[in-house]
Each structure stands twice: as structure tokens, then as C-alpha cells.
Image (cartoon, rainbow, N blue to C red):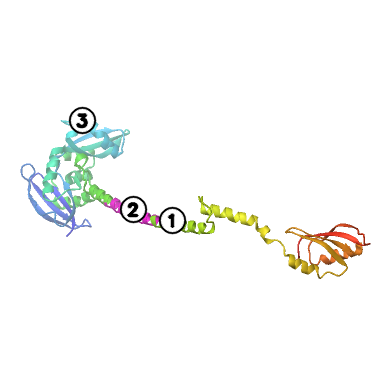
Amino acid sequence: MSGTAFIDLTEENLTVYLLGKNGAAVREIASGPVGEGYSFNLEGISAGTEDSCLSLPLGLLNFRVVDLPFSDISKIRELLPFELDGLVLGGASGIVFDARILGESSGKSRVLVAYLPKETLKTILNRLKTAGLDPKAVTSVELSHVLATAASEDEITRLLTTPEGLEEKARMERAIMEVRNPAINLRRGELAYTVDTEKTRKSLKMMATLAILVLLVFLSDLSFMTISIEKNNRAVRDEMRRTYLNLFPHEKRITSETYQLEAHIKQLKDKENSFRGISPLDTMLDLSRVRPGMKLSEITMDKDVIVLKGECRSLSDVQTLRDELGGILTDVTISDTRPSSHNGTLFTLTAKQRKT
């Protein structure tokens, strides 16, 4: 049966009870007398227990009541070592303590301080460790009972100085409450319970290790992908260089195949119109279909303009010729006319290009 081991230490005996997970089931699993130096024999009692809690008798504890100007228990615990230095023989460094606020008056808190020698508690804890027990909390069911039942501070003082016996049933009921919410916890400072902290630290360390391993796997995969991409890029660049050299074998200085290829394409586009030109044969065939009465003496053709020079019978024939040429050429204009020696009209016609 798993559960919490409640270690009830009295002046003469040490009894270990097993509390179920719901805090209701209680059964005794070990018991024995306490010898000199808090020696006891509890072999095997840790079997089936998840954690444990230790209760000390009132006879081991000492008490002081002090007035402090605030009610924050964490601040009280920080200030108490300075307050106790002048109240405790040997100073606060030789004791372990905890505090409970009894009440408030005139803006100050009345604080009950419970303490015992540090070496005494260390001896008891070491004895329990040999039996496989490491209590999470060190409290006192007797003190808890006093704080819960006393009606005034005076009554608390009386019950702490002359403690009354606590029946077993009431003791077990108080033990269950102490496991859930201890009235005090003397495991502080260098005697603080660290098992949970160590477990958390180990868990965090394991998580960090796993995270580092995952990161290393990711970085390895990323490195492999980077190397593979770089290898592919290198192959593409080599292929581009070979293709470029095949296109321009006489070019010696190559710094950027892409940039230089774009420059070559731009040069070709600039020369595009030079390669297009006109078709002289098609133009001459079209001119042969023009009505008779026209004599051409000169035909000049280039990529931008066609110049026709010749002779017609009259100026009206020149105009008629212009209109007919407008059917096969674009932008036909009469640029010059003058009389000829044969009573005709010499003309010069210009046009842009043959219509398609």
C-alpha cells in the first residue's frame, strides 16, 4: 500500500503510521523505543511509502514570542535571525526555527517562534535516513493541537509550558492535517528538504540534454541540406559556365555568366532592327503592277525609307501614282516635282515601308 509515512516522535517512542493517498486511511507500520542520542531501529519501514513527515514532541522545542512591525510571514522569517541572536544562547546560527503569527495589536504582529538546536534535528534526520526516510516537513502535532484549540495567547503559553496528553485518535486526526498543511516546518536553511528540488533539477537537466540532442540532429540535418544545396548550386554554375563558353568561345574574361549573357542579349536587341531590313524583290514586284505611263529612273531602299525617282506625263499622273503607291507602301509623299526636257514631269516620291 503506497502513501505518506507519518513519523510520530515522542519522548520515549517513535511510531510510524502509513497514511493513504486520500489522507483518511491510517495504520501503524512500525514502532519502537527511542534510545540515547535518538537512536531507534526501523528497518524496512520505507517500503510502500511515497514521502514522509516528522512530528517532534514539545519537549524538544523551545519557544519565544516577539513583536514585529509587519505581517508577511516570509519577511518575518528573514528578520527573525537578527531578533533571535540576542534571545538564544549561542545565537541564531546554531538553531533551526519557524514562526506562526498569533495575532495583531497596535500595528504589530505577535509572532510565536518555535526552534531547536540544529545539531539535534540533524541527528534525528540522519537516523531516519538510515531507515530510508527523508521527511519533507518537520512539524509537531502537539504544537498544532495547542495552536488549534487554545483560545488566547495566555492559554497557548500555559499549554506549551505544561503540555497535556493527546489521545491517539486526536493525534492521528492532527497528523492527517499536518501532512496536508503543517503548522510549522523546521526543515529550513541547510536542513531544507531538497529531494524534490533535485528531482526537478535532474528532470530539467534531462530535458535540456534532450533539447540539445534534438538541436544537434536539426543542425546536422541543416548542415547536410546546406552542403547538398551548395553542391547542386556548384553543379549549376559549372553547367552555366560550359554553356556560356560554347556560346561565346572567344570571350576570355568571365566574371558573371548571367550578367554578361544579359549584356549580350541587350546588344542583340539593339541590333534587331538592322537584321530585319526590307525585301527589295517583293517591293519591285509590287511596283511592276503600277499602271503604265511611269518611268522609274532610280529606286533607293533601306530599313527606314524608300525613295522613288522617275518621270510621268503630267503632275496629275504623279498624284495618281502617289495614290496607287499608297496601296502597297506606307506614308507615300511627293517630295519633289519639276518639268522634264520631254514635256513631262520629273518626280521624287518617298515612302516608309512595304505594307504587309
State the image quarter where residue 20 is shown: bottom left
Q: Residue at x 5, y 44 (%)?
A: 35
Task: Tell me the residue that label 2 is attached to.
Answer: 215
Residue 166's spot in the image, x, y percent? 14, 48
Q: Is residue 251 left or right of residue 75?
A: right
* Residue 85, label in figure: 3
Q: Which one is closest to the eye, mark 2 or mark 1? A: 1
* Residue 94, label in figure: none
Q: Is residue 268 left or right of residue 19?
A: right
Q: Which one is closest to the eye, mark 3 or mark 1? A: 1
Q: Residue furthest front?
A: 341
Asked if the residue under mark 1 is in contact with the one under mark 2, i.e. CB atoms within 8 Å, the reply is no
Circle 2 packing at 10 Å, graded few (<14), some (14-19), many (20+), is few
Quarter of the rendering occupied by the C terminus:
bottom right
Q: Amino acid at mark 1?
A: Arg
Majority secondary structure in the magenta region: helix
Q: Earlier in the sequence, mark 2 or mark 1?
A: 2
Quarter of the rendering occupied by the N terminus:
bottom left
Compare residues 263 and 196 and report the one nearer the observer: 263
- Is residue 222 rendered magenta in the image? yes
